[in-house]
Image (cartoon, grey):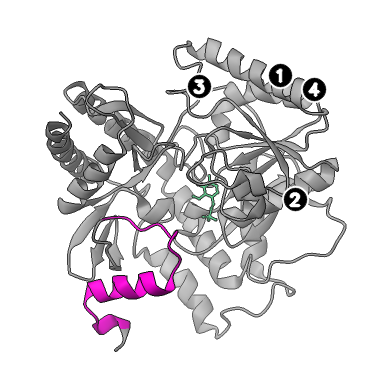
């Protein structure tokens, strides 16, 4: 029987039989999304949801956007889905020109991949080759992808396998502040402590020949942890003293999502040597990449290509998505509605002991859920909130070191009415979970 004709639970059983056990699925009854429009999606049982996770921060513009569909359709209609990246691809060049310009990195060049993982693997390859060193620094509680090097440098126990890493990794502070040793410091004390820690790690525990430091400007999977503005600028001074390259992983924070800036790292007054990106760029199409200083990008001596990275369909769609994002100033919309969301949730948190923290920037908002003592991480409360919001027609994300952070990252085209609708559902759902959390 074709999949489309089967009841949903059969699809789930078939999924479990042939897909890996570690492939995470949301919800006690996982859903199958079959259509989308604006910020809403509909599942195979006809239920419609407001999507406050934008797929998985992938649908940055939203669903069924004519400009993007038309650009993809035009390529499909040409009869060429893909031939080879050994030939010239006009849209790849145009998209690279635009990203190079937007990056602020001098003489920047772009290499396209199919995912964030590949983008970070490529950036690590470039940095380790350039510096002739396999020593890498990453932040505690980071997530950079699921392949050999990227999973190996991921500093979050739920997502890492660091003992298998092909590069040597040391972890520094600066990620998850709320439960770290510097939690009670002021912003300036916190930055100073992280800078000291970085210096100590480099000068005491390594031979000094470190290739690079890689960091998410706001940790994504790690629970939307926002460091004080300027922190990475202060850390980069230490990196510069030692010739260590700095890679900003903008897979979640790029393309205006943080509101204030186009790239998350711009809040730190620093230009990295390379940035990696994926997720939101293609509005759902599989595309990622690295934008790096020209000399760093060109340091590889061997020939290399990605068979599909930079293909005509994903670059045509991504170029249309990027034009849409810039033409409609979605970054400004993210700043405005993100503040409404954060302020609204902070108001709710005053009456809700189950909320331990509300944090974020732009449309990247985290709600940290805690137990009855007001402090212990509560993954159970987060799991309940996920189900309660779903039952009221709202999709949200989950994450954090203890899997106790609800993550909100709606499409950047979100409207004021939808912000209020989402807030109302969250408020109702939080009240239910709060009552259970005694
Ligand atoms: N880097 C960050 C910050 C991410 O959040 C992710 C995915 O969640 C990745 C890298 C890996 O990207 P992908 O899943 O596209 O391989």
* Residue lying at 28% horizontally and 81% vertically, measured from the top left: 4
Q: Nearer the viewer, mark 1 or mark 4?
A: 1
Callout 1 crowding tier (Cα within 10 Å): few <14, some 14–19, many ≥20 = few
The residue identified by callout 1 is 200
State how far apart marks 2 and 1 are (Cα): 25 Å
Q: Tell me which residue sits at (24%, 57%) in the image.
A: 28
Question: Which of label 1 and label 3 is nearer to you?
Answer: 1
Label 3, label 4: how far apart the Cα atoms are: 22 Å
Residue linked to disc 4: 241
Circle number at residue 228: 3
Residue 339: % across, % down = 32, 30
| Residue at x 65% of width, y 59% of height | 112
Q: Which residues are magenta?
A: 3-27
Q: Label 4's element? A: helix
Residue 68 visible in the displayed image: yes
Residues at discs 4 and 2 in contact (Cβ within 8 Å)? no
Q: Which residue is mark 2?
A: 125
């Amino acid at each position: 029987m074709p999949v489309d004709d089967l009841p949903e639970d059969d699809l789930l059983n078939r999924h479990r039989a042939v897909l890996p056990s570690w492939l995470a699925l949301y919800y006690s009854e996982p859903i199958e999304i079959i259509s989308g429009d604006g910020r809403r999606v509909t599942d195979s049982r006809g239920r419609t949801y407001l999507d406050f996770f934008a797929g998985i921060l992938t649908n940055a513009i939203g669903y069924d956007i004519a400009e993007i569909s038309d650009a993809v359709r035009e390529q499909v209609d040409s009869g060429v889905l893909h031939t080879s990246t050994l030939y010239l691809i006009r849209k790849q060049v145009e998209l690279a020109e635009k990203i190079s310009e937007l990056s602020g990195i001098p003489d920047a060049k772009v290499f396209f991949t199919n995912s964030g993982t590949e983008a970070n693997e490529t950036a690590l390859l470039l940095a380790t080759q350039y510096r002739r060193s396999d020593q890498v620094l990453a932040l505690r509680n980071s997530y950079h992808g699921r392949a050999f090097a990227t999973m190996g440098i991921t500093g979050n126990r739920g997502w890492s396998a660091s003992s298998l890493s092909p590069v040597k990794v040391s972890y520094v502070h600066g990620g998850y502040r709320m439960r770290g040793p510097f939690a009670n410091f002021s912003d300036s004390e916190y930055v100073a402590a992280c800078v000291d820690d970085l210096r100590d790690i480099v000068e005491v525990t390594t031979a000094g020949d470190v290739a690079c430091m890689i960091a998410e400007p706001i940790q994504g999977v790690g629970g939307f942890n926002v460091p004080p503005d300027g922190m990475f600028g202060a850390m980069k001074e230490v990196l510069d003293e030692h010739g260590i390259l700095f890679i900003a992983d903008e897979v979640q924070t790029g393309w205006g999502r943080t509101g204030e800036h186009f790239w998350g790292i711009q809040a730190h007054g620093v230009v990295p040597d390379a940035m990696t990106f994926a997720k939101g760029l293609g509005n759902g199409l599989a595309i990622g990449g690295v934008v790096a200083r020209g000399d760093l990008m060109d340091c590889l001596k061997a020939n290399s290509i990605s068979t599909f990275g930079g293909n005509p369909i994903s670059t045509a769609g991504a170029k249309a998505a990027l034009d849409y994002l810039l033409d409609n100033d979605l970054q400004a919309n993210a700043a405005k509605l993100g503040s409404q969301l954060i302020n609204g949730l902070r108001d709710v948190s005053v009456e809700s002991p189950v909320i331990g923290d509300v944090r974020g920037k732009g449309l990247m908002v985290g709600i940290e859920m805690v137990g009855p003592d007001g402090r212990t991480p509560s993954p159970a409360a987060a799991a309940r909130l996920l189900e309660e919001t779903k039952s009221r027609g709202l999709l949200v994300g989950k994450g954090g070191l203890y899997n106790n952070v609800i993550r909100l990252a709606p499409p950047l085209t979100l409207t004021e009415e939808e912000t209020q609708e989402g807030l109302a559902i969250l408020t109702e759902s939080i009240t239910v979970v709060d009552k259970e959390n005694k």
